[in-house]
Amino acid sequence: MKKYGHVFSVGVQNNLTYRFNYLTRTLFSFVPLFAMLSLWRTVYASKGGGQSLSGWTEAQTVFYYILVAIVDVTTAVNDDDWQIAADIREGNISQFLIKPVNYLWYRLCLFFAGRAAYVAIAAAPLAAFVFCFRKDFAAPATLAAWAAFPISLLLTALLQFFISYTMAMLAFWLLEISTLIFILFAFEYVASGHIFPLAFLIAKYPAAGHALFFTPFPSMLYVPVAIYMGKIPEGEIWPSLMMQLAWVLAAFLLARFAWSRGIRKYSAFGG
């Protein structure tokens, strides 16, 4: 564990080297978010004051996107899949085959190091953003939501990482995997609830909406946000966490399987 702790420490230091890049990325990420909030305010204004959409008030919808921003900052995978694919393509993983370091745990430590550095740098602009919409911000309604939210947040981060890691393993077989990564990202962006709360989809298309919850995508964003907001009934919170955990374990096993099969195909030459 000591060696992975060192990897985490070095990862944080390396990421803080690019703190201006992180700060710029954070600030510009608020541009589409402000656009989305303006869009929904216009939608609610067109329906008249006090109206709701699929049981969601305007304040709840605004609060939803605030929480989406918070969850994204703490759990999103940025460049990890690209870096892993580059390690495979350029032969950098050869060193991990002769050293007592597990590549999966090594990359997981770097992922959390990146998240820690990003949160530290993004905390101030994110706090300013939340302050601007403080009238729509609320604490979790129940103790169960207080307790479950950080657990769900951790499971979300792990699920996002393991899925990205598995996608990166395709570099063992394919020279360029950027198209596949973009396709997955585009589908995940819609199916996880980035664009709109999945409750809206369930209200409009119940069959498709409920079927979506048999995929890992809601667990990658919507579940922790819905837990915090109380949109998941208290009696269903722990089953929701168990579903998230099941997807994390499935993604972990798939990641290990992809590595074991890919490493058989891998070959590197020269020094």
Image: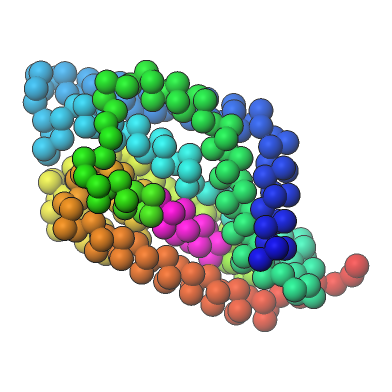
Task: Give percent across and percent down for residue 248.
Answer: 42, 65
* Vertical position of residue 83 compared to residue 267: above or below: above
Quadrant of residue 19 within the rendered picture:
top right
Question: Which residue shows up at 15% across the image and 30% down it?
Answer: 57
Q: Which of 269 and 99 lies nearest the eye of the viewer?
A: 99
What range is drawn magenta here? Answer: 153-167
Quadrant of residue 120 within the rendered picture:
top right
* Vertical position of residue 137 compared to residue 144: above or below: above
| Left or right of residue 147, residue 78 in this image | right
Task: Give percent across and percent down for residue 128.
Answer: 45, 21
Q: Quadrant of the N terminus?
A: bottom right
Q: Quadrant of the C terminus?
A: bottom right
Question: Which residue shows up at 44% across the image and 59% down it?
Answer: 159
Task: Give percent across and percent down for residue 153.
Answer: 40, 50
| Left or right of residue 36, residue 2 in this image | right
Question: Which residue shows up at 70% across the image and 63% down it?
Answer: 2
Task: Give percent across and percent down for residue 107.
Answer: 63, 59
| Left or right of residue 133, residue 166 in this image | right
* Vertical position of residue 15 compared to residue 38: above or below: below
* The stretch drawn in magenta includes residue 222: no
**Residue 198 visible in the snapshot:** no
Quadrant of residue 208 within the rendered picture:
bottom left
* The stretch drawn in magenta includes residue 163: yes
| Left or right of residue 64, residue 76 in this image | right
Question: Which residue shows up at 37% across the image and 65% down it?
Answer: 245
- Colour style of the rendered protein structure: rainbow
**Residue 122 visible in the snapshot:** yes
